[in-house]
Amino acid sequence: MQLLVSVRSADEVGPALAGGADIIDAKEPDRGSLGAVDRDVLRRILQRVPDDRGVSVALGDVSRPEEVGAAIHGLELSERTSPTYLKLGFAGVRSPDQIGLLIEHAVSVTSRMAASHRIVAVAYADSERAGTLPPALIPSLAEAAGAAAVLLDTHGKDGRGLLEWLPSGALVEWVALARQAGLLAALAGSLRPRDLALVGRAHPDVVGVRGAVCSGGRQGQLSEDRVRRFRLALEWAVRETRETGAISSVPTAAKSRKLKA
């Protein structure tokens, strides 16, 4: 499992990397679960991330194709050795056809950009509150539209974490759906170190965090020490999962997609 750490400024990149982050995620927590940072902030963040580390960029929730284009066009994203993941959510959209169209449009836009760019379709564990489709429906829509990955997160950031919306067994099933679709699977949503034993049972490809690695919560200052402790907890969860044999097999299609990533 890789560790994704969300940063809101270039100053947080160094502590995140030093603490053990595999993927640096650019996100402004004051703007919601997928709040986009300003373009100049994004540029400075990317300048500090080594080429061999993955990058993720939160682009917000979209409901129309023109919003997709506005979120992606103009991003200063150069070709990188490691992937650049572009995350889009669909709060307020309940139509499977419309969500499929939005993902397909995002994939089409990025296909004309650098080859390292990957679209991530975001599902919400609190889908009713977000006014969107249940998370189990997102992997198949993402696969059909050509996305590379799916993320299961929480839309509301009121202290209720992922495991308060879905039990660990549901996470296992959701990751299995993503793998069957040949997609990378990521889990996030106010996760704490003590949650990782249960999250590890699903064995996602990526675990994302912000609040637990900051002093003062997700709007606070990112702490290298907190990132390191979260990383150690994640590594422990991985070892426990391997020892109990709880790792699910990855279908051939998923293996192929991961190699391309």
Image: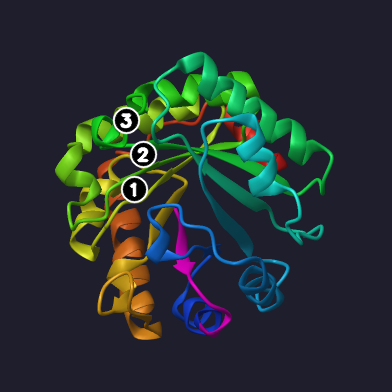
Q: Are marks 3 and 1 in contact (CB under 8 Å)?
A: no
Relative to 45, is 191 above or below?
above
Disc 1 marks a residue whose amino acid type is: Arg
Q: Amino acid at mark 3?
A: Gly
Q: CA distance from mark 3 to mark 2?
A: 32 Å
Whole-percent x and y of residue 163? 19, 45
Task: Please identify, in this view, whether the residue under mark 3 or under mark 1 is nearer the observer.
Answer: 3
Q: Earlier in the sequence, mark 3 or mark 2?
A: 3
Q: Secondary structure at mark 1?
A: helix
Q: Which mark is residue 131?
A: 3
Q: Which stretch appears magenta? A: 1-11
For the residue marked with disc 2, what is the amino acid? Ile
Give the image location of residue 230, x and y in percent: 32, 70
**Residue denoted by label 1:** 242
Q: CA distance from mark 3 to mark 1?
A: 37 Å
Q: Nearer the viewer, mark 3 or mark 2?
A: 3
Residue nearest the observer in this picture, 233 or 151 = 151
At 76% across and 59% down in the image, what residue appears? 77
Q: Earlier in the sequence, mark 3 or mark 1?
A: 3
Q: Is residue 5 above or below residue 95?
A: below
Label pair 2/1, CB-CB below 8 angstroms: yes
**Residue receiving disc 2:** 247
